[in-house]
Structure formats: structure tokens, C-alpha cells
Amino acid sequence: MTNSSDIHLDSPVDEAPGAPTFAKRGFAAMDRGRQRDIASKGGSSVPVAKRSFSRDHDLAVRAGRKGGLARMKAVHTAQSFDGAERPVSS
């Protein structure tokens, strides 16, 4: 259960008039400066020697291809049901 003090509502500045507002939680609820500080550290806690993609370009290529194929398969599967009940993805 969420405490009402944990929910931060921001007025939509960039959105169209009448657009719904959503409760922001976690990273999205932080101010922009704090988000930038955290994001700029991206992966610095992992030593360079342990960053497998930076050391092995082919590994990164294979992983990217595998993700792309999985995405294409999911889209194709969803389209092939033609209005039939679609499987629930987990």
C-alpha cells in the first residue's frame, strides 16, 4: 500500500490541455538534477575488466541481434492471432 505522502503529482507542462496526470514514483519522482547525477554514473560501479560488451564487440552484436529477433517474433506472434485471444506475456 502506498502512503499518500509517497505520491508526487506534477502538473503536465509539455502535455495537451485535458491530458491526465499520473503519479510519479521512484526515478521519475526525483528532480531533474538528481536524475542527471545518477544517470551520468551509468555503469561506473562495474570495473572495465568486467564489462563484457566493451571487451568483446562480437558478443555485443550477438546480444543485440538476439534481442531484435525476440522482439520481431513477439510482434509476429501477436499479429498472427487475428482477433483471437492473445496469450498473456509475463
Image: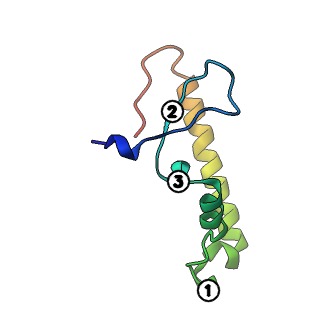
Which residue position holds label 1? 49
Residue drawn where x is 40% and y is 40% of the image: 90
- State the image coordinates of residue 86 (x, y, percent, origin top left): 44, 23
User: Neighbour class for label 3 at 10 Å: few (<14), some, many (≥20)?
Assistant: few
Residue drawn where x is 60% and y is 61% of the image: 34
Instruction: Give the secondary structure at mark 1.
Output: helix
Residue 19's image quarter?
A: top right
Give the Cα distance between marks 2 and 1. Answer: 41 Å
First reached walking from the N terminus: tag 1 or tag 3: 3
Which residue position holds label 2? 22
> What type is the residue that disc 2 sits on?
Phe
Residue drawn where x is 38% and y is 46% of the image: 6
Residue 59's image quarter?
A: bottom right
Instruction: Give the secondary structure at mark 2.
Output: loop
In this rendering, the answer to whether 9 lies above or below 83 is below
Per the rendering, the mark at residue 27 is 3
Per the rendering, the mark at residue 76 is none
Camera-side mark, 1 or 3: 3
> What type is the residue that disc 3 sits on?
Phe
First reached walking from the N terminus: tag 2 or tag 1: 2
Left or right: where 27 falls relative to 51: left
Residue drawn where x is 42% and y is 18% of the image: 85
> What type is the residue that disc 1 sits on?
Ala
- State the image coordinates of residue 74 (x, y, percent, origin top left): 55, 36
